Image: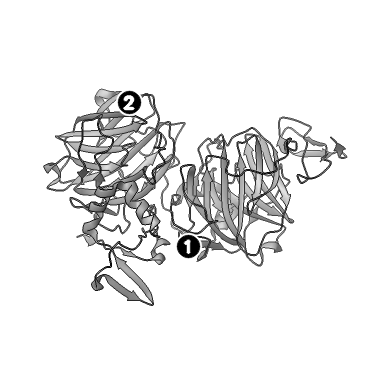
Amino acid sequence: MSKSMVKWLSVSLVAMGSFFWGCSESDPAPDKIISNDDSVFLKNDAKNMWARIDELGIAGYFDSLSQNGGAVVDVSAKINGRCPSPALAMDENTRYLDELESLFDEGEQVEGVCGYGLKLQDGQVAPLGVNLIDSMKAGTVEFWFRPNADFYEAPRTLIGNDGARVHFFYKNGELYFQKNHHNQHYYVKGSAKLKDDDWNLIAGQWGDGYMSVWLNGKIVAHMEHDKGYAPATRGIPFENLVVIGYKSDCCMEGPGQYSAMTTSGSFDQFRISNIPRYKMTDVADTTFPDTTKIDKVGDTVIVDTMPLPLDVSLWSLLAAQGTRYFEKATVPVASAAVQKCAAPALVMDDSTLYLDELETVYREGELVNGVCGKALSLKVGEVAPTGINLIDAMPAGTVEFWFRPNDDFFDAPARTLLGNDGARVHFFYKDGVLYFQKNHHNEHYFVKATVELQKDWNLIAGQWGDGSMSLWLNGQQVAVMEHNEGYEAANRDIPYENLFVIGYKSACCMEGPGQDAPMMTSGAYDQLRISKVARYVEKDRPSELVPQDSVTFDTAFVGIVDTLLDADTVLYPLVVYDSAGRPISFGPPFED
């Protein structure tokens, strides 16, 4: 039995992971308006959506909505719990997993491979909310599809973005997978018989020396290919947005398709990974991929749902198990919500790797009014795993978030703010000093500054990649040091050691800045953004930066910077470490 999908448009629904649209160009009929508790809901005209997209293109359609004051696209990232193989699952190589159970403006819910799927009729459209702006040297795009009876009556688009940077379509009995680059159209195609009365797993991948397309675990076509995925960078809004049901005539000259296409069928479980998941070792006889052990840099543990007693706090479980807790727990996927909010609210752009509006209803915490929409408020001991597993190497980057302290935030000597447990990126506050830490293997880099947090929202940021590593508070640089290292993820085979968590930090990996005890938080958080560029520029930056503030376990004598930028003298305490990295003696400070 199907459940009709009708989506109502209201600011309140943005916090629930739905799409929020602006007002239509014409006044709606009275029967399209419903008033409930002084809120006005506008029902979308489902028949008009494809026509508007066909007229304006995906980019133009969503840009017009955003210009008219409507929010644009939000991500659904519901992890559906336990589903038997071959259902797709979330693991550490998953960049996006959308169960397609959102209430889209068009289509209806049907029984899917895992929970519900989304069924679209000819002409109906579902924008996924995945704006694929990440460059990916290797990758796999997968989804489940079941054709409607009229699917074969015309060439059909399946899933992809309008610039065909990633795009699947079906024409004359052949399945196509296209991956364009600037002025270059790469594609593979082959004869493929879809199962009409059942689900088909369709996949395209690159990064193993080939570009290939797969159907139900069997290879359909492949070619030698050494290019990764590169997003379109033509400055067109939403040109990398992944959409089901619509494809303009743009950018398909390579495979010989010159007209727009619609779809007709059901979709479930859309997953993007940063590895090739299908093995090319025996192209002639390739079997269905093993989804519980990925052929990558070792074994991959599949995330499964673990029921938890309500009286056990998440902080207690993390304190006992660390990131290993997530081996058997469901981790949310990072939201890529894009809302139109007044400056200085953060926005998604081409340099954004992640933008999480922190409007998810986590197991702990509550939603409060934030800088942009809702925000997540945590009490002492409450924890929120963000779902961002930062395994991307980043030569340059900026991590930003909004924070508002609770009244008891200052009661403890030290509070964690945001980061991962290995302190590869970590912010914390101790005795009036704000720290930004960026560890590498056996090297602890950090900058710190004495600051006064506002009782209102504070924009906290750390960045690297411009020859320095710096810490910013409300747009002002408060600490900086010379630094030429990028970001490198931890690779010690500890599950989820690169996962961004709010509210929990073990005692691990903070010897450099001198914090040897676990920490909790107390406050509200909004808009976590991770960018692949250094976003902040100091107008009156000194010609020479202060010496590098780092601790290395490979060196016995280490200089620790304990000063602000305008200090006349930098004092270095002499620190001697044993082979395990423990300080064993402290000498008197000496002057540079």
Which of these two is toward me, 233 or 7? 233
10 Å crowding of disc 1: few (<14), some (14-19), many (20+): many
Figure quadrant of the N terminus: bottom left
**In the image, what residue type sits under mark 1?**
Gly
Pick the residue in front: 141 or 568.
Answer: 568
Q: Are marks 1 and 2 in contact (CB under 8 Å)?
A: no
User: In the orientation shown, which residue stands out farthest toward the bottom?
Assistant: 37
Q: Is residue 312 left or right of residue 574?
A: left
Question: Where residue 294 sits in the image (x, y, percent)?
Answer: 40, 35
Instruction: Give above or below for 24 relative to 423.
Output: below
Q: Secondary structure at mark 1?
A: loop
Name which quarter of the figure residue 203 lies in.
Answer: top left
Q: Is residue 291 above or below residue 63?
A: above
Residue 314 rendering spot, x and y as whole percentages: 54, 58
Which quadrant holds the C terminus? top right
Pointer 2: what residue?
280
Q: Is residue 326 visible?
A: yes
Q: In the image, which disc is placed on residue 373?
A: 1
